[in-house]
Image (cartoon, rainbow, N blue to C red):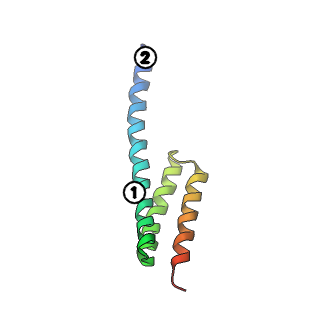
Amino acid sequence: MANTPSAKKRVRQIEKRTAVNAARKSRIRTFIRKVEDAIRSGDSEAALAALRAAQPEIMRGAAKGVLHANTASRKVSRLAHRVKVMAPA
């Protein structure tokens, strides 16, 4: 257990940061789930709107260090491809 004042402070900071990161990850997963639900329902307009809302949220997670940049790009790319495929010709 932390004994020095600086170590105790680091523990407090880590707890706060962990809570913020967990909330951010949960928010990202929620946005991704909305896109996937819209894709499953077959509504291309809703899927496109959900993707447009999810993309900045995913990239913000990468910018904040919650997700790796390549992971975020991969998720956005795969979602965009799935939305594009279902769009009317």
Residue 8 position within the rendered picture, expressed as x and y whole percent measured from the top left = 40, 20
- The count of marks equals 2
Residue at horizontal 45 percent and vertical 77 percent from the top: 44
Q: Secondary structure at mark 2?
A: loop
Residue at horizontal 41 percent and vertical 43 percent from the top: 22
Residue 66 position within the rendered picture, expressed as x and y whole percent measured from the top left = 50, 45
Residue 74 drawn above or below residue 6: below
Q: Is 20 on the left-hand or right-hand side of 80?
A: left
Q: Are marks 2 and 1 in contact (CB under 8 Å)?
A: no
The residue that label 1 is drawn on is 30
Q: Nearer the viewer, residue 71 or 11?
A: 71
Q: Is 25 on the left-hand or right-hand side of 71?
A: left
Q: Residue furthest front?
A: 40
Q: Nearer the viewer, residue 78 or 27?
A: 78
Give the number of the disc on residue 2: 2
Residue at horizontal 49 percent and vertical 62 percent from the top: 55
Mark 1: few/some/many CA within 10 Å (<14, 14-19, 20+) = few
Task: Give the image quarter of residue 21.
Answer: top left
> Is tag 2's residue or tag 1's residue first in the polypeptide sequence?
2
Q: Secondary structure at mark 1?
A: helix
The alpha-carbon separation of the residues under discs 2 and 1 comes to: 35 Å
Q: Nearer the viewer, residue 58 or 43?
A: 43
Three-letter code, disc 2: Ala
Residue 72 position within the rendered picture, expressed as x and y whole percent measured from the top left = 55, 55
Choose mark 2 or mark 1, whichever is in front: 1
**Where does the C terminus fall, quadrant-wise?**
bottom right
Three-letter code, disc 1: Thr
Q: Residue furthest bottom?
A: 89
Q: Residue furthest top?
A: 3
Mark 2: few/some/many CA within 10 Å (<14, 14-19, 20+) = few
Q: Residue furthest right?
A: 70
Residue at horizontal 55 percent and vertical 75 percent from the top: 84
